Image (tube, rainbow, N blue to C red):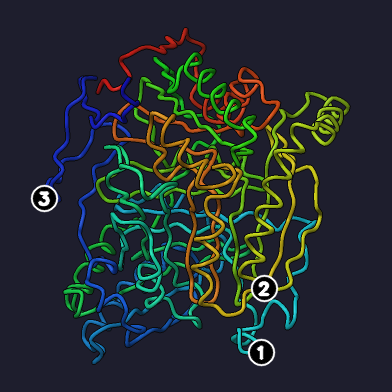
Amino acid sequence: MAPPRLSSSVCSSGGRLRLPSTSCAASARLVGRWVRPSCSLPMNGCAAGAGARDRGAVGVRETRALPAAPAARDAVGQLRAAVAALEADPPASPSGIIRIEVPVRQRGDAVEWLHAQSSLPRCFFSARAPLPEWPSLAIRGGSSSNGNGAVGFGEEWQQPVSVAGVGSAVFFRGTEPFSLRDWRAIKRFLPRDCPLIRAYGAIRFDTTSDHSVEWEEFGSFYFIVPQVEFNEFEESSVLATTIAWDDSLSWTWHDAVNSLQSTLQKISSCPVTVNNSTLQTTILNLNHVPTKTSWDLAVTKALQMIKEKQRELVKIVLARCSRYITDTCIDPVELLACLKVEGQNAYQFCIQPPDGPAFVGNSPEQLFHRKYLNISSEALAGTRARGKTMADDFQIGQDLLLSSKEDNEFTIVRDSIKKKLEMICDDVVVHPSKALRKLPRVQHLSAQLAARIRNEGDEFDILNTLHPSPAVCGLPTKEARQFIQDYEIFDRGMYAGPVGWFGGAESEFAVGIRSALLGKGHSILVYAGAGIVEGTNPSFEWDELDLKASQFAKLLRYQEQHICLQEAENMGTVI
């Protein structure tokens, strides 16, 4: 049975669907809520040969601040004028990256700003608030240590609440597994003393597996440094533009200026209010891969292998892909706005390549955060619904805390992450070792971990070692991943992979769960997974998948209508 595919169709005014052109020359606009933006192809920082990717930092790396503006609409003109002045006085260096930013005195909404823009690619990342029980990161030198025993760059920089960006000053995409060389290619554009020059993106769950058609545009990894971005802070905002060039990558200063000016001309200065309570759509059809019968068989097989004492397997995480067909095209930014309402203690993200679908999610799970030498991570496992009353919610939470099956699953995850950190880091701290994480719809068992890497170059090892965690793959990793390849009949793509950003002195990644893929037509793929350990009941885990996907299902059910739930053989049909 073929896996579900996102429709490659687009909306037409007659209600039928037609295939869009994949050429960048195509400038057709979609009728309705979708706009087909024009696309440009700036430099791919990972496209050159090994010699270019192993070069040191680009020649010019700086941030320039312009006078503050009273509102975002006033900042757009300042940026256009500043870029025009740059064009008249080009830097002498053959490579570089320059960020020009305008502080805005009032706080704006990054989602509303993004909703007003038509350019692709686009990205969004919203950091979650620090958890109150987070362990101290002031280990041997404090959180502002820059890796050389000295204090960081003056005062600690203010962190954005949310960042939205369009266009790409430089992008990084490859079809081979994400490597140290690729990481270095990204980092050469990211100055340590320009903290808001960041590369936002995602990496596939399994970079060694075949790519299905719906994930092709993402490659094995996809990151962008946005050309224009809106930074939302607690009490203010920043509108910024970034220009990057490198003659060795066949992207000159002249190319970069022309591309940036084209993007700036399309920037809307007025944010557009987003309906964040409903998507005003109706589900017409729903397919699950695997079906409930196939799920039961896969879980039973996993349990058999776990119980075989001669095998090392103790946990396998299996996932489900649910394809919803709706009566209208769903705008990814509108979905993002709705998810953000439920986004307490979670990361919201959206990554969309120029000609690809949008990967949107609301993940509660941190993979890691690095600031200078300090690392934080967490273990998250075990799931229960929230109660309808405070007393009911408390009892459900206690049942989760006392469940031997859930404790087994959680302990596997926590201890594995701790051991992985100990391989690379010093001073690994776990506190609390087990607690409840309560989200709007579900609650989990969680533990926070803190550590310290020996040098900032170990960041790639942290990413490469922590992903995939037992929370989304299993343990041991190699055996669990092989089982997933053998028994899952759809491509996870970026689902359950690292999603976040790299910076010069700081980086942060979430685990890409509670996520969906939105195409240009009427379909949306929603992903959810469940951990299989000894004592697992296949039907209970199927219900857990429904619970985890419920935040998407609720938003799609604008009207009460009979849903045709198909678990049949037409999963690959393009509608």
Question: According to the image, label 3 marks what residue?
Answer: 25
Question: According to the image, label 1 marks what residue?
Answer: 149
Q: Is residue 327 left or right of residue 433?
A: left
Q: Amino acid at mark 3?
A: Ala
Q: Secondary structure at mark 1?
A: loop
Between marks 3 and 2 in the image, the one whose residue lies nearer the viewer: 2
Earlier residue among tags 1 and 3:
3
Q: CA distance from mark 2 to mark 1?
A: 13 Å
Who's the residue at 61% across and 79% down the image? 454
Query: What percent of the width, then of the height, locates residue 456?
Result: 54, 78
Q: Is residue 306 above or below residue 66?
A: above
**Nearer to the camera, 406 or 263:** 406
Q: Is residue 547 left or right of residue 102?
A: right
Q: Secondary structure at mark 2?
A: strand
Asked if marks 2 and 1 touch (Cβ < 8 Å), the reply is: no
**Mark 2 Cα-neighbour bin, 10 Å: few <14, some 14–19, many ≥20:** many
Q: CA distance from mark 3 to mark 2?
A: 49 Å
Q: Is residue 166 left or right of residue 419?
A: left
Rendered image: mark on residue 452: 2
Earlier residue among tags 2 and 1:
1
Q: Amino acid at mark 2?
A: Arg
Between marks 2 and 1 in the image, the one whose residue lies nearer the viewer: 2
Query: What percent of the width, then of the height, locates residue 556?
Result: 48, 24
Query: What percent of the width, then of the height, locates residue 4?
Result: 34, 26
Query: What percent of the width, then of the height, locates residue 81?
Result: 30, 76
Earlier residue among tags 3 and 2:
3
* Quadrant containing the C terminus in the rendered view: top left
Q: CA distance from mark 1 to mark 3?
A: 52 Å
Q: Is residue 178 above or below residue 146?
A: above
**Mark 3 Cα-neighbour bin, 10 Å: few <14, some 14–19, many ≥20:** few
